[in-house]
């Protein structure tokens, strides 16, 4: 199957409270912004060249938003709004290691989708490696482990749902559920999607995420 025949996956970006600061658009201009209905017009105003889709008013919080995405997109790659760089972990020299070409970033995502489908995986993600020196040339792919919600995808037939009682930590839950239900996934260790301000920036989940909620959800997962 040639590259030109590979259909690109839908890329969505759940966002809240950051209408004027969606950093990921500079890397993936073709993404679809998924926003609360109350913020739809603001997002359209600040992002006129990007498709904006509003969730119903009753869909509140990141976990319910992600579930709404699964209910409305058969195959989808979710990426957070604060991704600022894509890095080749097999290149240890910066800026050579950074991927700046929009077309190449899309190709990386769609190539990983293709590999995931070829091996029958129902979820895929990318490396969580922060330090490229931790990358092993003998482990280009992983088939078990945690998949960060900041950059993960779902393929046709995954048949999974989030635990809507959790207001965060939902990616840990869905990673565990995938292991239980499908036994393996695809994590492309060659590339890292680097975020900025995950726990510090205004908007996003930071208004709901507290130390208490993180402890509660951790105990729930156990």
Image (tube, helix red, strand yellow):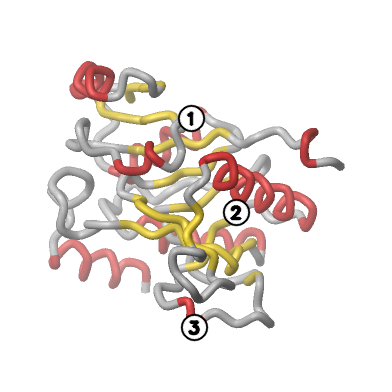
Instruction: Please name the residue shown 63% across and 45% down the image.
Output: 107
Say which mark, if any, is on residue 164.
none
Q: Mark 3 or mark 2: which comes first in sequence?
A: 2
Q: Secondary structure at mark 2?
A: strand
Closer to us: 123 or 94: 94
- Callout 1: helix, strand or loop? loop
Looking at the image, is mark 3 or mark 1 earlier in the sequence? 1
User: Residue drawn 56% across and 33% down?
Assistant: 10
- Residue 30: mark in rendering: 1
CB of mark 2 within 8 Å of CB of mark 1? Answer: no
Q: Residue at x 38, y 20 (%)?
A: 49
User: What residue is drawn where x is 13% and y is 47%?
Assistant: 202
Crowding at dot 2, Cα within 10 Å, few <14 / some 14-19 / many 20+, comes out as many
Q: Name the mark nearer the viewer: 2 or 1.
A: 1
- In the picture of the structure, the residue carrying the numbered disc 3 is 134
> Which residue is the extreme one toward the right?
1
């Amino acid at each position: 199957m040639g590259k030109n025949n590979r259909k690109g996956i839908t890329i969505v970006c759940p966002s809240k409270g950051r209408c004027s600061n969606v950093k990921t658009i500079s890397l993936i201009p073709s993404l679809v912004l998924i926003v609360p209905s109350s913020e739809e017009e603001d997002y359209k105003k600040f992002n006129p060249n990007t498709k904006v889709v509003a969730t119903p008013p009753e869909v509140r919080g990141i976990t319910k938003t992600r579930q709404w995405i699964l209910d409305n997109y058969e195959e989808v790659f979710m990426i957070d709004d604060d991704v600022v760089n894509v890095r080749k972990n097999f290149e240890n020299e910066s800026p050579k290691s950074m991927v700046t070409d929009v077309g190449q970033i899309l190709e990386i995502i769609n190539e990983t989708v293709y590999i995931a489908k070829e091996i029958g995986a129902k979820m895929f993600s990318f490396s969580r490696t922060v330090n490229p020196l931790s990358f092993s040339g003998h482990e280009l792919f992983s088939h078990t482990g945690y998949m960060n919600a900041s950059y993960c995808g779902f393929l046709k037939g995954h048949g999974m749902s989030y635990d809507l009682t959790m207001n965060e930590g939902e990616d840990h839950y869905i990673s565990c559920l995938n292991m239980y239900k499908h036994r393996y996934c695809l994590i492309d260790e060659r590339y890292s999607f680097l975020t900025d301000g995950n726990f510090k920036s205004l908007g996003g989940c930071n208004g709901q995420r507290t130390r208490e909620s993180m402890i509660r959800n951790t105990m729930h997962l156990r």
